């Protein structure tokens, strides 16, 4: 069925160029779609980072939210006043750092994919929810 338009109260068929222009105007702008995708990447990163990580033989759960990481840093610095961390504390800090680094790397890769997209369809094809650390 051909696209139609109203002109002076009369229903007329659109020319192929008019139809193409109409469809182009309806399509989302690449810049808008990229901005939304970047925001979604940041949102997912924050959620995954804050989910925590389990480490050690006892399966200790570590809070890797911003507040949890700040507490870990304070505890590490306060062990003996010199920042000397016992082996279990070092394991906890390393697990938290590895998780945060993995989230940063995944986010950077996704941001690069979004920036490299040539059109909105390519942005929509990026699976922002996949590939994050468990």
Image: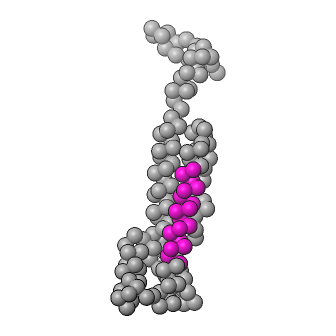
Q: Position of residue 32 (x, y in %)?
A: 47, 39
Most foreground residue, 14 or 55: 55
On screen, residue 14 above or below 93: above
The C terminus: image quadrant: bottom right
Main secondary structure along the magenta-highlighted residues? helix
Along the horizontal axis of the image, is 71 left or right of 9? left
For the point 53% across and 37% down, the residue is: 30
Q: Residue at x 55, y 87 (%)?
A: 56
- At a point 64% along the width and 21% down the height, the residue shown is 1
Answer whether residue 98 is magenta in the image: yes
Q: Please provide the residue range marked out in magenta.
A: 95-112
Question: Which sits in the foreground, 51 or 14?
Answer: 51
Q: Is residue 51 left or right of residue 70?
A: right
Examine the structure image and report whether residue 77 is included in the region drawn in magenta.
no
Please identify the quarter of the rendering in which residue 82 is found. bottom left
Q: Position of residue 52 (x, y in %)?
A: 48, 74
């Amino acid at each position: 069925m051909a696209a139609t338009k109203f002109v002076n109260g009369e229903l007329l068929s659109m020319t192929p160029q008019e139809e193409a222009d109409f469809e182009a105007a309806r399509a989302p702008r690449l810049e808008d779609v990229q901005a939304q995708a970047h925001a979604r990447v940041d949102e997912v990163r924050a959620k995954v980072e804050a989910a925590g990580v389990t480490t050690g033989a006892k399966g200790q759960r570590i809070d890797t939210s911003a507040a949890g990481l700040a507490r870990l840093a304070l505890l590490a610095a306060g062990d003996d006043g010199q920042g000397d961390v016992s082996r279990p504390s070092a394991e906890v800090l390393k697990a938290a750092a590895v998780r945060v680094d993995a989230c940063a790397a995944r986010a950077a890769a996704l941001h690069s994919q979004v920036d490299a997209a040539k059109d909105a369809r390519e942005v929509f094809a990026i699976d922002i929810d996949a590939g994050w650390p468990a």
